[in-house]
Amino acid sequence: GFYLSNSFRARWYGLVPEVVQIRSLFFDDRDIRERLSYYLIVNQIFSVIARAGHDGLASEAELLAILRARLKKLAQELTGAGGEFATSLLDKPHITAKANLAIRLGDVDE
């Protein structure tokens, strides 16, 4: 799906006037960060970390530490939405995940 930021709505309207007709594309920044953290971190990066750990290429703890260090660096270097995204990942006690994660943890293949 597409997630356009409410905080940039006027800018989007100026760039693509037709988007005015598709209000369902716009979300609050907090909601976008939640969804992006799920798709990017849980679905993609955690999958790579888990696979590398299972294959004995590196420990998951080491790879998670590398990810955390990279996020800290990005939080300091990036401004705007990118920096806010990295900071939000570091500050949250939990990252949002879908309920089907419990099924995967139970080693049940959907």
Image (tube, rainbow, N blue to C red):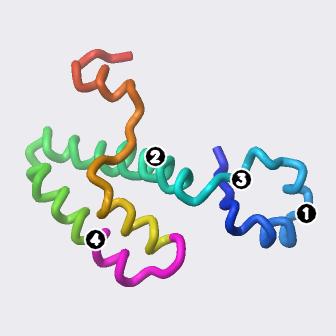
Tell me if residue 8 comes above or below residue 89 in the rendering. below
How dense is the environment of label 1, judged by Cα within 10 Å: few (below 14), some, or many (20 and up)?
few
Number of marks present in the image shown: 4
> Disc 4 designates what residue?
70
Mark 3 or mark 2, earlier in chain: 3
Numbered range of the magenta stretch: 70-81
The type of residue carrying mark 4 is Arg
The image's mark for residue 39 is 2
Look at the numbered discs 2 and 1 and tell me whether their residues touch, using CB distance below 8 Å.
Answer: no
Q: Which residue is mark 1?
A: 17
Q: Which residue is mark 3?
A: 26
Q: Nearer the viewer, mark 3 or mark 2?
A: 3
Rounded to the nearest angstrom, the CA distance separating label 1 from label 3 is: 14 Å
- Whether the magenta-drawn stretch holds residue 77 is answered as yes
User: Between disc 2 and disc 1, whose residue precedes?
Assistant: 1
Residue 20 position, x and y percent, is 88, 56
Left or right of 91, for residue 85:
right
Q: Is residue 71 left or right of residue 106?
A: right
Residue at image x 49%, y 56%?
33
